[in-house]
Amino acid sequence: MNTENSIRLRLRFYKDIDENIEVVRQKFVDYSKVISPDFLMKIRNNHIQFTIRGEKQRYWSPYLSVELEEKEGNEKNATHIRGLFGPAQTMWTFFIFLHFIIAGIFLTFLMFAFSDYALKQSIVNDVIIMISMIICWILLYVIARQTRVNGYGQMEELEKECQKIIG
């Protein structure tokens, strides 16, 4: 997984293995019974979710979502594994909420600026607020990148645990 050169905020990996999907799922079920207390694993059908818990958990701690899919063309004798890293759901929801608030403020003051322009009034204050919203968007992106950098070590731990299970 290349974490340095990607502009995406959510990193992912793919792996194909020559085992039946039920065998792979059972490996995860068996491992969930002996997993370290530093990790939490939830298994629902062919969806597995890993996360860090306990004293190692921080607000920027990532989670790993793993999907097990039957690989086409191998008569159900192979499994395609898709892994997706992401922030905690509460953190992700908070960032999306902030994006909507900033977008709403930006659009509101864009309409005010258009109205003021049509009425031949000063649009300086409207433009200042719109520029500050653009700066806030850039700041949110920088913060999101920094939280991802903070989580690199834990992402690697989660990926190692996943690799240990699937072999």
Image: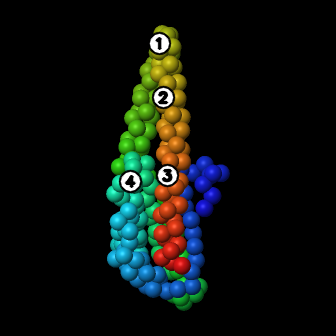
Residue assigned mark 1: 119
Residue assigned mark 3: 151
> Considering depth in this image, is 122 or 152 the residue closer to the camera?
152
Q: Which mark is residue 132?
A: none
Of the residues under marks 1 and 2, which one precedes in the sequence? 1
- Which secondary structure lies at badge 4? loop
Q: Amino acid at mark 1?
A: Leu
* Residues marked 3 and 2 touching at CB (< 8 Å): no
* Residues marked 4 and 2 touching at CB (< 8 Å): no
Q: Give the Cα distance between marks 3 and 4.
A: 10 Å
Q: Residue at x 51, y 34 (%)?
A: 139
Q: Which mark is residue 57?
A: 4
Q: Give the Cα distance between marks 3 and 1.
A: 50 Å
Q: Amino acid at mark 3?
A: Gly
Q: Give the Cα distance between marks 3 and 2.
A: 27 Å
> Which label lies toward us, 3 or 2?
3
* Residues marked 1 and 2 touching at CB (< 8 Å): no
Of the residues under marks 4 and 2, which one precedes in the sequence? 4
Residue assigned mark 2: 133
